[in-house]
Each structure stands twice: as structure tokens, then as C-alpha cells.
Amino acid sequence: MPENRVTLDDRCFLSLKFSPAQQRLLHTYQQPGLWPDAKWHSVDNLHLTLVFLGPQAVTAQQELWSKSLELLREHPPVQLCFDQYSQFNQAKILYLGVSKPNPALMALQQQLQQLALPYLHTPVPEHFVPHVTLARKFQSSTLFPQPAPPLELLCTEVALYHSISSVQGVSYQSVETYTLVPKD
């Protein structure tokens, strides 16, 4: 864990962590030719956020991670099928989404969200939309959602990430990782 400091540049979140091979597959869905003005995420930043925690003291991060591990030990890997492009208009984000979320994913997200409630400083979104952010500063007159070639991924890791801002841009760094184990 990093030193015990919190800044607005050091936000954290719980996320499904994709392997480098999975990130490369997701990266192929970024289409600069179609949307040249968008600010595309680097391949290393592709992930699926389960719970945004915001700025947290290291002690709170450690406590929440410990509680999360108790929950994660009961969850098998999660199968996802990414099959549509969509956008969050207000946030100006283009994402690759899951039109039919796996009930196991939705249950995992809700359980982690409940664990995190005492630590949150901002309102919880009303509806969880499983997605991978492909680009920011995205504006398009295209009507969404748009179909995307289906991409099935088995997600085997959950991580506690830090969002680090620098002159080069934002970097998402995993500081703790847990591997989900298939159940008998």
C-alpha cells in the first residue's frame, strides 16, 4: 500500500482486472477511425469498475480490502459477453458494454457496493452498468447503443486500483489483487 496520504489525484476503486491478453482483445474495440476526436484509454487502463471508492485513507483501503476478501472467497470467476458500444452523455464516455449482464456479476457488484457504503463520500449510482471505458471526451451524434462483435471473457481477478494523475495522463494501478477460484 502507498504511504498514508489522500489527494484528489489518488482515487481508488474495486474492479474486475483483465489479463494483458484480455486487455489487448478489448483494445481492438477502440475505433479512432470512427471517432477521431475521442481521448482513448491506453490498453493498460482497460478494466471494469465494480465500485468507485474515491479518495480513501490507506487504513480504510486496507480494512475494505480485507472485508472484500471474505466476500471474494465465495465467488467463482465471472463470465461476461461484451456486445455493444454505448455512451454516458453527461460524462462524455464511450464504452463497451454488456447487454445481458451475468447475474453473478450483478450479485458480486451489489455485495461489494454494500461493503463499501460506510467508506463512500459520494452518492452511489442508482443503476450499475457493467462496462469498459474505451474513450473519454467523447461526443458523437451516433445513436447508441450500437452492436459490437461479441467478446466473451472469463474474469478471474478482482483488484483494488488507484487512479494516478500525471502529466502523461491518468494511470490505473492495481495495489491489491485477488484471484477468483472456480467452485466445485
Image: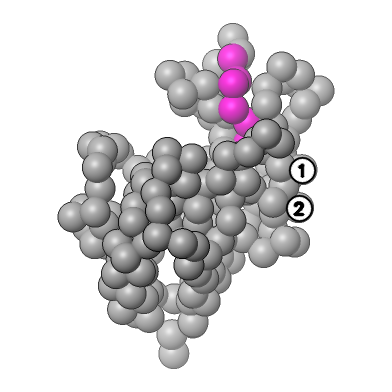
Looking at the rendered structure, which numbered label has been put on residue 24? Answer: 2
Give me the C-alpha separation between circle 2 and circle 1: 7 Å
On screen, residue 28 above or below 154: above
The residue depicted at 56 percent of the width and 45 percent of the height is: 164
Say whether residue 91 is left or right of residue 46.
left
The C terminus - image quarter: bottom left
Residue furthest to the left: 118
The residue depicted at 49 percent of the width and 82 percent of the height is: 182
The answer to whether any part of residue 100 appears in the image is: no
Residue at which label 1 appears: 28
Find out whether the residues at labels 2 and 1 contact each other: C-beta distance under 8 Å: yes
Q: Amino acid at mark 1?
A: Thr
On screen, residue 125 above or below 68: above
Q: Secondary structure at mark 2?
A: helix
- Quarter-wise, where is residue 33 in the image? top right
Task: Report the span colored magenta.
Answer: 134-139
Neighbour class for label 2 at 10 Å: few (<14), some, many (≥20)?
A: some
